[in-house]
Image (cartoon, rainbow, N blue to C red):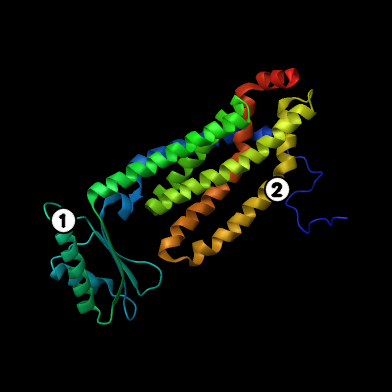
């Protein structure tokens, strides 16, 4: 005999009327997505080194970094960085410099990197350079284009997969919901000013995959119940299906959330942004599976779904 779980988010006999707030959920989601699109253009995303080109030098000083002293040393050396900022501990320094222009960019880039190393070592003796990366403007623009293509291709593959596995209404509802999730995450990036680079593209693709899996689970139960309860109104059936999968949805989301949380707190400069965006995407993807995907399905064709079920 199987034992009952020690903890459940919702009692098995609890029936929450999610469809009652379907209009408010769709309106709030649409407003947030529109605001996110506006934020995408103004102030826009903070592009990382991969997409804007330039030079990044990360160093660690012997004690707490004196940023005024470091900036003065760089200015004295004729180097004008785009930003000199802290990351991680008070000893960690990140220096960003725009990509050099003109002929012989490779030699100019190496000269800039050597100049930065010399200037910060003179300003703070004992400073260790941890990382020095450079990406040219042409390479960065190509990476940005490829990143956007990867997102578009992923959405197209998801549409084909859901269309083949489910009916047309399911596929369109799922992809529209995923686009809303994606735009909200982009708005979050614009507000938080995390650098948008290839790591963030990986985060967005991961969120799309997780959110798709979450919606497929709910849609599977809806399709089963369409065949099981042939006379039940679709609105009531959607509520029933969401309630039946709610503990599974919340349990999976909480597991992934708790796994990503330590990375957001202690992952350092490389992983903090990625994990924080993942946490936001998990919350958005879970809520959209409940409050957006099902209401869109109800909106897109109650009569057609019921007609096809009766015919089957």
* Residue at point 42%, 41% (across, down): 150
Q: In which quarter of the image is the N terminus?
A: bottom right
Residue receiving disc 1: 105
Residue farthest to the left? 103
Across and down, in percent, residue 34 comes to 44, 35
Horizontal side of 76 relative to 39 (left or right) equals left
Q: Which of marks 2 and 1 is nearer the N terminus?
A: 1
Q: Is residue 240 above or below residue 98?
A: above
Horizontal side of 73 relative to 96 (left or right) equals left
Q: Is residue 94 visible?
A: yes
Within 10 Å of the Cα at label 1, are there few (<14), some (14-19), or many (20+) other Cα atoms?
A: few
Residue farthest to the right? 1
In the depicted view, which residue is nearer to us: 47 or 109? 109
Quadrant in which residue 163 is drawn? top right
In the depicted view, which residue is nearer to us: 142 or 19? 142
Q: Judging from the image, what secondary structure is the residue with disc 2 in?
A: helix
Q: In which quarter of the image is the C terminus?
A: top right
* Residue at point 57%, 46% (across, down): 210
Q: In the rendered structure, find residue 248 and report the number of the disc placed on it.
A: 2
């Amino acid at each position: 005999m199987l034992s009952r779980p020690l903890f459940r988010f919702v009692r098995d006999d609890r029936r929450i009327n999610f469809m009652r707030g379907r209009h408010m959920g769709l309106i709030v989601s649409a407003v947030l997505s529109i605001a996110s699109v506006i934020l995408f253009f103004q102030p826009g995303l903070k592009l990382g080194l991969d997409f804007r080109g330039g030079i990044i030098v990360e160093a660690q000083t012997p004690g707490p970094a004196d940023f005024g002293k470091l900036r003065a040393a760089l200015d004295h050396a004729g180097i004008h960085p785009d930003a000199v900022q802290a990351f991680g501990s008070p000893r960690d320094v990140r220096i960003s410099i725009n990509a050099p222009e003109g002929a012989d960019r490779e030699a100019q880039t190496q000269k800039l990197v050597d100049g930065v190393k010399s200037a910060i070592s003179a300003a703070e003796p004992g400073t260790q350079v941890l990382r020095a990366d450079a990406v040219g403007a042409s390479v960065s623009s190509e990476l940005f284009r490829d990143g956007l293509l990867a997102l578009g291709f992923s959405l197209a593959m998801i549409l084909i997969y859901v269309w083949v596995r489910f009916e047309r209404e399911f596929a369109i509802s799922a992809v529209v919901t995923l686009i809303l999730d994606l735009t909200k995450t982009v708005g979050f990036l614009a507000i938080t000013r995390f650098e948008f680079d290839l790591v963030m593209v990986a985060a967005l693709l991961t969120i799309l995959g997780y959110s798709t899996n979450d919606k497929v689970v709910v849609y599977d139960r809806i399709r089963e119940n369409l065949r099981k309860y042939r006379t039940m109104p679709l609105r009531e059936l959607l509520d029933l299906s969401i309630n039946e999968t709610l503990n599974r949805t919340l349990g999976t989301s909480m597991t992934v959330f708790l796994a990503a949380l330590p990375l957001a707190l202690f992952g350092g400069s490389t992983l903090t942004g990625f994990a924080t965006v993942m946490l936001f995407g998990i919350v958005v993807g879970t809520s959209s599976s409940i409050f957006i995907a099902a209401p869109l399905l109800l909106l897109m064709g109650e009569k057609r779904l019921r007609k096809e079920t009766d015919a089957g």
